[in-house]
Each structure stands twice: as C-alpha cells, then as structure tokens.
Image: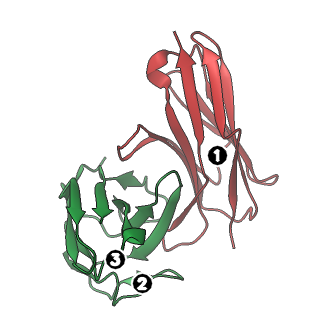
Chain colours: A green, B red
Amino acid sequence: SAVISQKPSRDICQRGTSLTIQCQVDSQVTMMFWYRQQPGQSLTLIATANQGSEATYESGFVIDKFPISRPNLTFSTLTVSNMSPEDSSIYLCSVRGATTTDTQYFGPGTRLTVL
Amino acid sequence: KQEVTQIPAALSVPEGENLVLNCSFTDSAIYNLQWFRQDPGKGLTSLLLIQSSQREQTSGRLNASLDKSSGRSTLYIAASQPGDSATYLCAVTSTNAGKSTFGDGTTLTVKP
C-alpha cells in the first residue's frame, strides 16, 4: 500500500491569488493523478502526472490554470492559479504503482475555499 | 467515453442488515474496478479492487462482484454497523494510462 500526505489540508484564499498543493508519497510510484471534488459531487480527473514526462490534462483543464510539477517518483505539486470562487473544491492526489492493474490510493485531500 | 452510474444515490438501513450497492458502466473493456469509501470531508479509502479477469473479491464483511459483460458490479455489506456509514464510490479503469472514471457514489446511513 501507499501512504500519501497532502499540504495544506485546507486553506481559505482570496480571489485572484494562487495556491500550491503538495503531495508526498511514502514509496516510489509511477502513476500520479490529481482530482477535483466539487461540493456534493463525485471526483473529476484534472491531470495525470507521470515522472519524466509532461502532465496530461483532461478536457476542460489547462496547464495555465493548473500547472503541475513531478520532480521525482515520490512528490508532486498542483497549483491552482488566479482563483475564483468556482475553484472551491477538495483537491485530491492519487497514485498507482507501476501498472494499471495496481491498486489506486488517495491522499486525504486539500479543502480549498475561495472568497 | 466511459460512464459510471451508482444506484441508489442514498440508502438508510437499520444496524445488522445485509445490503447491496450497485455500480454499472457503459464500456465493458475495462482493466479493473475498484470500490472506495469516503467519510465526510476526508479522502478515499480503498476497499476492494477487482481485476477484469476476476469475478469477485472479499474482505471481511465486504464482497464485491464483477460481471464485465453486462457492465455491472455489486458491493455486498454483511451485518451492517453504524461505522459503515459513509459514501461508497465505484471507479472503473478503462485505459492503460491508469485513469479512473468515478460514479457519483451511494451515501449509506446505518442506524443504531
């Protein structure tokens, strides 16, 4: 199994500012994903962040708004840029091991409120 | 495009009952299906992972089945307890990039 920590656990931010969320894994993993969970809704994939390659964004999400770094096999950051109240969500980091058949694990999430 | 549906959206049962949560998906070409539990304001906890070649997986009071050809999975919870109260999410992996599509979840309340 993988143990994932995220920082910060929650934050309240002003419109127009940016927030960087950190994701740390206790073991080396190939596949890392960032999800968003808006209030009362299910999870939506923002992007896939595999080490050694550029992040791959899902439809509706762009790099200028959600830049991602993946400097090594245990760490990643997601930045939410130029925030608006619509960005208020829980942001979740998730990992798999080396293959698609591996179990997917999630971090505790970062609860973001934008005023 | 894969779509995942979970029924019912909410379920309330008395303690001790056995119950079944349902998950259906539109594209049967999947790698695996995973059931998660989410407590309010928390992240997701993995419950069971079923590979496409498997029919079921069991862990304690939980049993998950998979019928890939019909695009269905069920999560069976035996002898439910108040501590089982949570939202249960089903996630289907349909690509070798490891990305998952989630259902909207079933919110379970077990009354003492």
Q: Mark 3 lies on which chain?
A: A
Q: Can residue A73 be seen in this view?
A: no
Q: How crowded is mark 2: few (under 14 residues within 10 Å), some or many (20 or more)?
A: some
- The alpha-carbon separation of the residues under discs 3 and 1 comes to 29 Å
- The alpha-carbon separation of the residues under discs 1 and 2 comes to 30 Å
x and y percent of residue A6 in the render? 21, 57
- Amino acid under disc 3: Ala
Which residue in the protein does label 3 denote? A49
Q: Is residue A15 positioned above or below B85 on the image?
A: below
Disc 2 element: strand
Which residue in the protein does label 1 denote? B54
Left or right: residue A15 compared with residue A75 = right
Quadrant of the rendered structure where residue B93 is? Answer: bottom right
**Which quarter of the figure is the N terminus of chain B placed in?**
bottom right
Q: Which chain carries label 1?
A: B
Left or right: residue B17 compared with residue A93 = right
Q: Which residue is drawn at 60% across and 51% down?
A: B104
Disc 1 element: loop
Identify the mark nearer the N-term, 2 or 3: 3
Disc 3 element: loop
Instruction: Check if mark 3 and mark 1 are on a common chain.
Output: no
Q: Nearer the viewer, residue A96 or B15?
A: B15
Which residue in the protein does label 2 denote? A56
Q: Residue at x 51, y 9 (%)?
A: B112
Q: Is residue A36 positioned above or below B43 on the image?
A: below
x and y percent of residue B91 in the render? 56, 54
